[in-house]
Image (cartoon, rainbow, N blue to C red):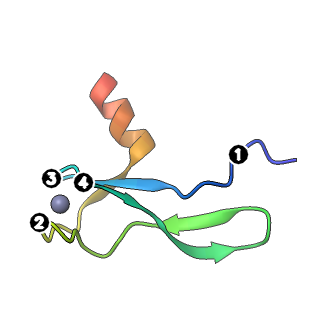
Amino acid sequence: MSHTPDLPERFVCKSCHLVYAGTVVGSDGETHEFEAPGECAACGSTAFVPIEQYIYDMKA
Ligand SMILES: [Zn+2]
């Protein structure tokens, strides 16, 4: 039984802070891998950070 909910990982644009759902890039049936979008549709930035890291940075 997995302890991780099967939800898409989310990524935050480091430039304009828009949040994107990750794209599934791989799956072994139990876990999924997610990848940030290639570039931000709003500002064109290619720098993304996983939302868990983003929240951590905001609290630090
Ligand atoms: Zn952006």
- Which residue is identified by label 4? 18
Label 4 close to label 2 by CB (< 8 Å): yes
Residue at the limit of the structure toward the right, as seen here? 1
Q: Is residue 29 something that shows in the picture?
A: yes
Ligand 1 near label 2 (Cβ, under 8 Å)? yes
Q: Is residue 25 left or right of residue 59?
A: right
Which residue type does callout 1 highlight?
Answer: Thr
Which residue type does callout 2 highlight?
Answer: Cys
Which residue type does callout 3 highlight?
Answer: Cys
Name the residue at 34% across, 40% down: 54
| Disc 4 packing (10 Å; few <14; some 14–19; many ≥20) | some
The quadrant in which residue 42 appears is bottom left
Name the residue at 32% across, 23% down: 59
Residue at the limit of the structure toward the left, as seen here? 43
Q: Is residue 7 left or right of residue 59?
A: right
- Which residue is identified by label 2? 43
Residue 27 against residue 52 in the figure, above or below: below
Ligand 1 near label 3 (Cβ, under 8 Å)? yes
Which is nearer the eye, 50 or 40? 40
- Cα–Cα gap, marks 4 and 3: 6 Å
Ligand 1 near label 4 (Cβ, under 8 Å)? yes
- Which residue is identified by label 3? 16
- Which residue is identified by label 1? 4
Label 4 close to label 3 by CB (< 8 Å): yes
Residue 35 at what x, y percent from top left? 46, 68
Name the residue at 35% across, 71% down: 37
Quarter, ligand 1 = bottom left
Disc marking residue 17: none
Check the picture and name the quadrant holding the C terminus.
Answer: top left
